[in-house]
Image: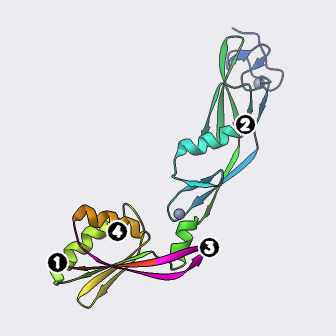
Amino acid sequence: MSDLICPKCGKHGDEKEFIEAFCSDCYPVKLKCPTKLKLEQCKGCEKLKIGGEWTAYSDKKISDFVIGKCRGDFKYGNFDLENHIAEFTVVKDGKQTTVRRSILFEMVTTLCKYCSRISGGYFQGIVQLRGPEKKVEKYANMFIKKLSNKTFITKEEEKHGGFDLYVGSSKAVIVLLSELKVKATITRKLVGLEEGKRLYRTSFLIRL
Ligand SMILES: [Zn+2]
Ligand SMILES: [Zn+2]
């Protein structure tokens, strides 16, 4: 039996771990956390915008971002995204305890530069497959499968005598063509300027 009673919340020493006179929830740990935080996430590719950069999504990155905004006497911290609770491990008088703070975390969905360009109708490459129907179908499926791992496919269009595939990155097409040892007739057309950079649309004509 413990006769400790937390002066802040009234919890008893039997129901809670104590540090000095306080329960571990109320122990006055020097800890400064924002009450609210938000991050931008791209609804196209799920990337997160952290420190001005778009980066691949991971729960760990969100946790590191939130904990990185907190200051205090903790050894390490972890943010529970589901419950919006930041947990900090604090060592005091050789005793280790967990301190929790709730932080209202908001994910703001938006479009990254890359995806907004695509949804705005920009695309960098067109794969034009031409040849016998069966062969075109086989190659179209293969290209769709392989390219969607690497870039965006913005449009698929059946053409008379072939198939057109609009993709976000012509570089990905070049890499795939050399992997598959497929020859293509490449033409590049200037379609506009963005932030002083020339935007090209590249066509890959593949005769099967
Ligand atoms: Zn307490
Ligand atoms: Zn995106």
Residue 82 appears in the figure: no
At mark 2, the secondary structure is loop
Q: Position of residue 116 (x, y in %)?
A: 56, 71
Task: Answer with left or right where residue 149 lies relative to residue 95.
Answer: left
Q: Counting other residues with Cα less than 10 Å from the Cα at mark 2, is it few (<14), some (14-19), or many (20 or more)?
A: some
| Residue located at (26% from left, 91% from top) | 160
Earlier along the polypeptide chain: callout 2 or callout 1? 2
Nearer the observer, disc 4 or disc 3?
Answer: 3
At mark 3, the secondary structure is loop
Residue 190 counted in the magenta span: yes
Residue 160 counted in the magenta span: no
Rounded to the nearest whole Å, what is the CA distance between mark 4 and mark 1?
Answer: 18 Å
**Quadrant that contains the N terminus:** top right
Q: Which residues are magenta?
A: 182-200
Q: Position of residue 22 (x, y in %)?
A: 78, 19
Q: Which residue is mark 2?
A: 70
Q: Amino acid at mark 3?
A: Gly
Earlier along the polypeptide chain: callout 3 or callout 1? 1
Q: Which residue is mark 1?
A: 135
Residue 118 appears in the figure: yes
Residues at discs 3 and 2 in contact (Cβ within 8 Å): no
